[in-house]
Image: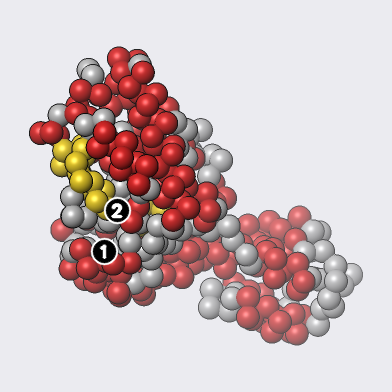
Amino acid sequence: MIYYVIFDLVVELKLTKSKIMKPLIYYPSFEPPDEIWLKFALLYFKECRPIIPYNRENLVSNGFREIKENTNLINAINPGYNEGVEASIKAREEVESICRRPHERSHHFNHVNIVRKFRDEDSWDYELFVEKFSYEWKDYIIENGFGKKTDNGLLMSKDLGFIFMSFLASEIAYVEDTAIVTDNDAFDNFTNSRRMNNIGLGRRNNFAKGIINLLVPQNLSEIPFEKLIKFRNKNIGHILAFNNQLDLVEDKIGRGYVERDFIKEYNEIYSDFNKKVIGQGIGLLAIPFSAFMMIQNPFATAISRVKDIMGMLGVAYGGTYTLNKGLVDIENQRNCKKYLTNLGRLKI
């Protein structure tokens, strides 16, 4: 009996689209003060968007500027007028609520009386630039003794600055249809209470970081940025595939599925295709040997070669798409596996 394998190219185009993690709005500062966080971002994030007014981009460090100019990781976003106004309104309402019940809300900031700290000039060590807020916010801060005017904007406590930046980042993320991210976990109680944190994103980031920590043979702090920049640029396609595969296990993270399970799954990336073939009632021996070898060859499974495989098989358009999806999945898995392998070779 002769079997035919039928692919559907129309469905194939849809299957190649991944929901790969969207760009993340970074806050509260222009750049992460923690180098390890930034190094991790180079190895995993698709794109990070710090909130930096156009005329303040000269204030970033040389190292951060080098990453911005030589990779696709950093894409600064200029805060818009509307986002600044909305953030000012919501931040003011939040601070007013805290002032009404300071002892009730102070635990969100790990402080006995957070309002007293707002007014303590010794704690005013955070400068909020004028491009980010409305004049109502400025008047409110000064009139209540929570900060003072500077040449660049307002000087206030880190707590108050974080409150404002949390709302500004959230407003921008809403417009951009994405999520916010920060390397500052000191205010987790506050952001969790306001439902600003994306719990799933947090789990996913920690999971990815765990995989990287398991595979990179050297302490990440010892690897220079220059090396990581070159590594990212060389592996950007594999990084996207890595994110694509994380999409598939996102629901399992936090339910007993650990980083070593993820790594183990990529020891063999072709078994799923074989299962799909058998599941369709198609014996592997029914596929011409030359075509089968082409499919198994990791350099031939790219989507651009599917037509070649189809030509060798002499197949028609239109039937089921299951096997075609298997080929697409294998390509993503192959690139993810390659990335995991490359992480294991990353050294100074």
For the residues labelled 1 and 2, say whether their Cβ atoms are less than 8 Å apart: no
Density class for disc 1 (Cα within 10 Å; few <14, some 14-19, many ≥20) is: few
The residue at the point 33 percent across, 66 percent down is 54
Q: Residue at x 10, y 33 (%)?
A: 122
Q: What residue is drawn where x is 75% and y is 73%?
A: 9
Q: Position of residue 111 (x, y in %)?
A: 23, 22
The residue carrying mark 2 is 130
Tell me the kind of residue under disc 2.
Val
Whether residue 51 can be seen here? yes
Q: Please, what is the three-letter code of the amino acid marked with disc 1?
A: Arg
Q: Is residue 224 left or right of residue 176?
A: left
314 w.r.t. 126: above or below: below
Q: Which residue lies at the image location 40% right of the left edge and 30% below the top edge? A: 94
Query: Which percent across, then down, holds residue 27?
Result: 33, 49
10 Å crowding of disc 2: few (<14), some (14-19), many (20+)? some
For the residue pair 32 and 60, the one nearer the viewer reads as 60
Where is 223 relative to 144, above or below?
Answer: below
- Asked if residue 204 shows in the view, the reply is no
Residue that extends furthest to the right in the rendered view of this protein: 1
Label for residue 109? none
Relative side of 264 to 323, left or right: left
The one of 152 and 224 positioned closer to us in this rendering: 152
The local secondary structure at tag 1 comes to helix
Residue 2 falls in image quadrant: bottom right
**Residue 260 picture location, percent across and down:** 41, 45
Q: How is the image coloured?
A: secondary structure
Answer with left or right where residue 308 lies relative to residue 169. Answer: right
Q: CA distance from mark 1 to mark 2?
A: 11 Å
Q: Quadrant of the C terminus?
A: bottom left
In which image quadrant can residue 216 be found?
bottom left
Numbered circle sitting on residue 56: 1
